[in-house]
Amino acid sequence: GDLETSGTALQLAQTVGLDIDHQALAAWWRRYEDPHLGLRLTPQAGLTSAGALHGGLIIALELKLRPRYPDAIGTQLNFLQSSTGGFGARHGALATLQATRLALVTAQQLEKLRESNYE
């Protein structure tokens, strides 16, 4: 499992009305938290930093989980911004419209989580 795929799967499951074990998913998500990275990547999954942060925050919002390290998540998101102003899918990657849109949505998600009363 990885954060990006799991976030998408959670949204799809909820769209079609499948029951999800929220407690198990929350426990799994908490294992991805990291004080330096915010949310760790799954190296063998081949996903991007932008995708992992976005998927991880989808899960957090859906399960009403407040991240323990929101500043680290914000820092990782800032690392995706290029000198041109746009965002890349990974640190140092070429900025694209798709990655920039994903980064902006992720920043909005993070702000919602910071303002929330979630646990």
Image (cartoon, rainbow, N blue to C red):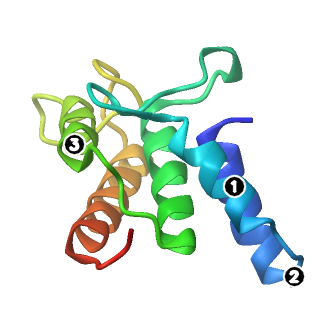
14 versus 74 height, above or below: below
Residue 72: image location, x then y, percent: 22, 37
| Image quarter (top left, top right, bottom left or bottom right) of the N terminus | top right
Q: Secondary structure at mark 1?
A: helix
Q: Secondary structure at mark 2?
A: loop
Which label belongs to residue 25?
A: 1
Q: Which residue is drawn at the image coordinates 73% and 55% (left, top)? A: 24
Residue type at the position of mark 2: Val
Would you call the spot at circle 1 few (<14 residues within 10 Å), some (14-19), or many (20 or more)?
some
Give the Cα distance between marks 2 and 3: 34 Å
Q: Nearer the viewer, residue 105 or 82?
A: 105
Residue 79: image location, x then y, percent: 21, 29
Report which quarter residue 15 is drawn in. bottom right
Q: Secondary structure at mark 3?
A: loop
Which residue is label 3 attached to? Answer: 86
Which residue is label 2 attached to? Answer: 16
Residue 95: image location, x then y, percent: 30, 34
- Which of marks 2 and 1 precedes in the sequence? 2
Give the Cα distance between marks 1 and 3: 32 Å
Apparent side of residue 37 relative to residue 61 in the rendered image (left or right): left
Residue type at the position of mark 3: Gly
